[in-house]
Image (tube, helix red, strand yellow):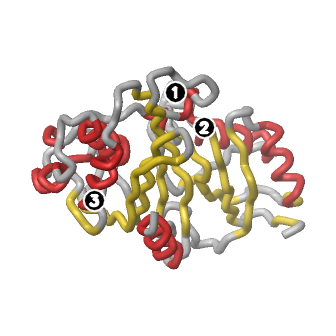
Amino acid sequence: MSQLAAGQRLLLHLAFDGTAYAGWQVQPGQVTVQGAVEAAMARLCNRPVRLHGASRTDAGVHAAHLPAHLDLPRPFAAAALLRGLNALLPPDIVCHRLEPVASDFHARYAARGKLYRYRIFNHPVRPLWDRPYLLWEARPLDVAAMATAVAPLVGVHDFASFCAADADTTTTVREVVAARFGPAGDELHLEIAGTGFLKHMVRAITGTLLEVGLGRLPSHGLTAILAARDRGAGGPTAPARGLCLVEVVYDPAQLEQWRAHLGDQ
């Protein structure tokens, strides 16, 4: 991969702190992650470059791994391209690596699964160091009830009750292959893996789980909420800052690994 030819399709493996951005996707008059990466690539290549991301993220949501592909408009040494791109990117975005892919590869349509994590700090004293990356909940939470509540989410369901009303989608049916809620050091984490997710879906699930933890909903309440297929039946949408897209995968075998790993916790 030392030398890349003009026209070569590349997959960039990106990570970012989403605090300052209006999400991934380019929007008029907004600062976005896609826009920042495209601007950096355009400076390197001396011409416009179009990125196609594996996923969209909401404003303020973070990503430890969001792949995106592009067609390289000019020859480049691979190491120089990676080094130059990271030099031009803002400090809250990084490209960990890049790789050539087939000319018909598409970062979004080839994706087979995504793993999200939502972080909650449940303590009477507010957090200091990780404030932009988690939700602080000072009130006591029933963690056992919240852990039980996620079980009905696993499987193929209509997740309309956990979908933003303005979502642009033809169907609200999605498959969750694994879901886990529980302690992780000083925090509580919701980890949820699936073949696809709806707009605000993980944040809406988190907000509903918080209602369970606060005793406002029973631990079995998500079954009825799913069946209602009505966003009004679910809890509030949790803030974006606690959510991170952990990984996007292209190998279906990874889904089984997530199922085994999260199911054993």
Dot 3 lies on which element? helix
Mark 3 or mark 1, which has the lower sequence index?
1
Q: How far is disc 3 from disc 1 in space, using C-alphas?
A: 34 Å
Instruction: Check disc 1 and give the amino acid type.
Output: Gln
Using the image, determine if residue 124 lies above or below residue 228: above
Q: How crowded is mark 1: few (under 14 residues within 10 Å), some or many (20 or more)?
A: few
The numbered disc on residue 153 is 3
Residue that appears at 81% across and 52% down: 82
Image spot of residue 240 (x, y percent): 44, 34
Foreground mark, 2 or 3, reads 3
Image spot of residue 224 (x, y percent): 12, 53
- Rendered image quadrant of residue 122: top left
Image spot of residue 232 (x, y percent): 15, 38
Residue wearing tag 2: 35
The reply to whether callout 2 and callout 1 are in contact (CB within 8 Å) is yes
Image spot of residue 213 (x, y percent): 29, 39
Instruction: Check disc 2 and give the amino acid type.
Output: Gly
Residue 138 in view, yes or no: yes
The numbered disc on residue 56 is none
Residue that appears at 40% across and 52% down: 181
